[in-house]
Image (cartoon, helix red, strand yellow):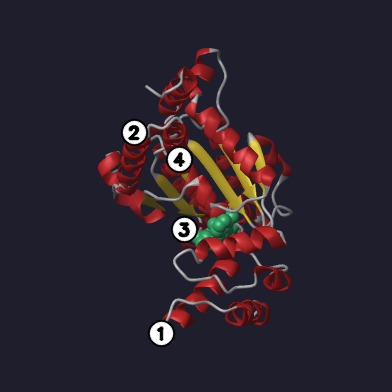
Amino acid sequence: MAASADHVKALVRAHAEGDEDAFYSIALQLAAKSARQGHNRLAAELRELVDQARAQPINKREPIPVVQPRGELAELVSASYPNVHLADMTLAESVRTQLQRVLHEQRQRERLENHGFAPIYRLLLVGPPGTGKSMSAAMLARELSLPLFTVRLDGLISRFMGQTASKLRLVFDAAARNRAVYLFDEFDAIGAERRIEGDVGEARRILNSFLLFLDEAPSESLVVAATNHAVILDSALFRRFDAVITYDVPSAEQAIQVLRRRLTSMNTAEVDWDDLMGHVSGLSHAELVRAAEFAAKDAILSGDDVLSTSALRSALDRHHTTRHS
Ligand SMILES: Nc1ncnc2c1ncn2[C@@H]1O[C@H](COP(=O)(O)OP(=O)(O)O)[C@@H](O)[C@H]1O
Ligand SMILES: [Mg+2]
C-alpha cells in the first residue's frame, strides 16, 4: 500500500474540517506518490475517483435543506446556495490569508467553543466596487456549506421608510434561528445618516438596532457587511466587527490572472500577456471579467475560439473609456 501515515492523517483532518478542496488535493498527492513508486494502476484509479467525485453536481453531494425565507421575510432577504470556491478568486495575499483564517476558525468552532472562545463571525468587507466583496460572502457560504441570505440595505431603507428598524428585526431574528451566512450588502446605507432625508430619528434607530444585533448575534451564523465607502461609517460600527477586510483593485499580475481564469475555455496560445499588463491598470476584477467575456464572445461569434492580443487589448481599453458613463 502506497499511502503514507501522514497522508492518511491529512485526509482525516481535511474530512473533519469539511475542507473538500484539501481532501481531494491530498488524494491527488497520494496518486502522484503512487505513480512515482510504480503503482500506476492505483494512481490512475485514484485520479479517476477524484475526477468523478468533483464532477458530481453539488446538490447530489450534500443535500442542504432548502431554507427559503417566507412571508414578510421573503421581501427583505434573498436566499441562495452559491458555488464559488476560494480557489476561484484572485485576491491579494493579505485578503486571502484573512479569509482562510475565517474558514479555519469556523470549521473548528466547536473546539474553540469548548474552551469558551467564539470563532470570527462578524466581518466587515470594505473596498471599491467589483473587487470581490459579495463574491467573498458567497464563497464563505459555499466553503462552509451554508446558505447565503442577502439583505440589500439600500433597497430596504428606501422601501420601508419609517419602519426599517422593525423590518431589520425580522432579519435578525431569522439569523438567530438559521445557521447561515447573512450578507448585509451596501452596508454604508446604514451609516449614511444624513442621506436619509427628513428623519434623523429613523436613521438612529436603524443604526442602534444594528449595533445591538452585532452584539447579540449568535456565533453560529456568519454576519458579513460589505461597503464601498468606509469613510462614512460610524466608528462605533467598526469596533463591533471581529475583522475588517480591505479589498482593492488587482495588481497587474493579478489582473492577468483574472483574465486568464475567465478564458480557460478559449484558445489563448497566441495572447501576449505581458503586452496586456500595460492595459489593466485601475480596472476592478469585475471590469476585467467583463472585458474578457466581451472579447471571448466576439471571437466565438466570429467563428472560432482563438483570442488575439489586440482583441483583448481593445476590450480592456474600451472599459477604460466607458467606465464612467
Ligand atoms: N477577487 C475576485 N476574483 C475573481 N473574480 C472576481 C473577484 N472580484 C470580483 N470578481 C468578479 O466580479 C464580479 C462582481 O464582484 P462582486 O463580488 O459583486 O464585487 P463587489 O461586491 O466587491 O462590488 C464577480 O461575480 C466576479 O465575476
Ligand atoms: Mg457587492
In the image: residue 200, left or right of residue 104: right
Q: Which residue is mark 4?
A: 143
Residue 245: percent from the left, percent from the top?
66, 44
Q: Amino acid at mark 1?
A: Gly
- Mark 2 and mark 1 lie on one chain; the one further toward the N terminus is 2
Amino acid type, mark 3:
Phe
Q: Which callout, 4 or 2, points to the residue nearer the camera?
A: 2
Question: For mark 1, what is the residue?
Answer: 303
**Is disc 4 placed on a helix, strand or loop?**
helix
User: In the structure shown, which secondary structural element does the residue marked by tag 1 occupy?
Assistant: loop
Circle on res. 175: none
Query: Which residue is found at the position 43% from the left and 22% from the top?
Result: 8
Secondary element type, mark 3: loop
Cα separation between marks 4 and 2: 29 Å
Q: Marks 3 and 2: CB-CB under 8 Å?
A: no
Q: Position of residue 231 (x, y in %)?
A: 74, 54
Q: Are marks 4 and 2 in contact (CB under 8 Å)?
A: no
Label ID, residue 42: 2
